[in-house]
Image (cartoon, rainbow, N blue to C red):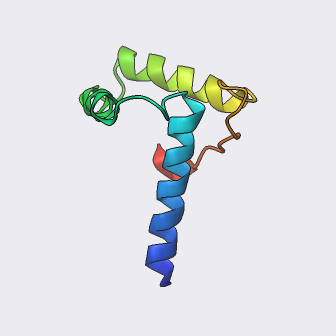
Amino acid sequence: MTADRKKEAREKFLLGGIVVKAGLSKVDRAFLLGGLIELARVIAGSAEHRRLRDIGREAFKASSLDPSSPRVEENAGWR
């Protein structure tokens, strides 16, 4: 596996972990994608963006939102 493919695979793994941490691993995929598309429309730096980012930061600090989900570490490159 090339370095680029390894990096891409790791990123996908970590993003999947975020879905699990949020308790969304069993939701309808169309619902999940729709929610992500809506999130992509939030203007960076807006009050809503800051509010959602703060919620996410607190979730990373918490041991878990779902007791059965693994802890997902924040990747600074995602900001």
Taking the image as shown, residue 64 lies to the left or right of residue 56, namely right
- The total of numbered circles placed on residues is 0
- Quadrant housing residue 17: top right
Taking the image as shown, residue 44 lies to the left or right of residue 7, namely left
Which residue appears at 28% of the width and 25% of the height?
42
Which sits in the foreground, 55 or 69?
69
Taking the image as shown, residue 6 lies to the left or right of residue 40, namely right
User: Which x, y percent locates residue 25?
Assistant: 49, 35
User: Which x, y percent locates residue 54?
Assistant: 54, 22
- Quadrant housing residue 72: top right
- Quadrant housing residue 35: top left
User: Which x, y percent locates residue 58?
Assistant: 64, 23
Which sits in the foreground, 48 or 64?
64
User: Which x, y percent locates residue 1?
Assistant: 50, 84
Which residue appears at 33% of the width and 36% of the height?
29
Q: Residue furthest right?
A: 63
Check the image and report above or below for 46 versus 20: above
Check the image and report above or below for 29 versus 11: above
Which residue appears at 53% of the width and 55% of the height?
13
Q: Residue furthest bottom?
A: 2
Check the image and report above or below for 8 versus 29: below
